[in-house]
Amino acid sequence: MSHVRLLILISLIFHSGCALFEKQPESPDKIIQNSSHQKIFLANYDQVWRAAHSAIQYTIAVENQDYGIIETEYIKGVDGWLPPDQSKPRYSGSRYKIHFVFARGKTTDGRESTRLTIEKKVELLKDFISEPQMIPSDGLEEQVLFYRIGREILVQEALRKAAENSDTPSF
């Protein structure tokens, strides 16, 4: 009788163990959070790369255009960006870095596009001994960066069109 129970127990563990490795669907909140950190620009990769460099106002620690990665140095919370409704950072002992990931793409009609993911990694430093605590970003600085990059792309495109129109002779 104990062999039967053991066999049933092993069978249950084996079958439930396989279910543990199945990919669980993401929650709607997680999907919305991930998508709010991404934007697709209808511009080629190099335009978005240049526009991002114009929008970044921090020292860059890691940059690789072939892999599509830009990462800033750590920025102290007191030296970083503040929303318009705040005069000082929420956490005085915080620091953060911003991570940009670029990906080339094409639209369904064949136009070049670039997906940009911006992730702000905020750490709260309590003291020198304890590990930093990760704090979720409010997403405002990322939205401002997306806006600035979009405006830079618009300006680049307007300048390109103006240059093309000035090359044509007027009669």
Image: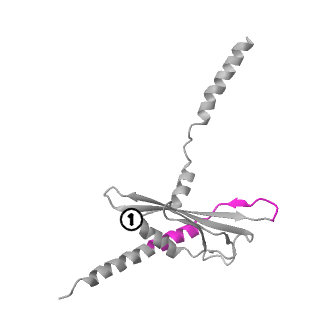
Residue stretch in magenta: 127-150
Quarter containing the C terminus: bottom left
Residue 82, percent across and down?
A: 63, 75
Residue 101, percent across and down?
A: 52, 61
Please identify the quarter of the rendering in which residue 11 is found: top right
Residue 159, percent across and down?
A: 36, 80
The furthest residue to the left? 171
Give yes or no for residue 130 being in the magenta stretch. yes
Please identify the quarter of the rendering in which residue 160 is found: bottom left
Camera-side residue of 142 and 161: 161
Q: Residue at x 53, y 71 (%)?
A: 144
Quarter containing the N terminus: top right
For mark 1, give the secondary structure. loop
Left or right: where does residue 135 sit relative to residue 102? right
Residue 88, percent across and down?
A: 69, 76
User: Does residue 81 sit above or below 42 in this rendering?
Assistant: below
Left or right: where does residue 17 sit relative to residue 52? right
Q: Residue at x 42, y 70 (%)?
A: 47
**Amino acid beneath label 1:** Leu
Count every numbered label the image shows and give the total: 1
Give yes or no for residue 135 being in the magenta stretch. yes
The furthest residue to the bottom? 171
The residue wearing badge 1 is 42
Q: Mark 1 packing: few (<14 Cα in 10 Å), some, or many (20+)? A: some
User: Does residue 34 sit above or below 70 in this rendering?
Assistant: above
Q: Residue at x 62, y 76 (%)?
A: 85
Q: Residue at x 82, y 61 (%)?
A: 129
Colour setup of the view: one colour
Left or right: where does residue 115 sit relative to residue 167? right
Left or right: where does residue 111 sit relative to residue 2? left
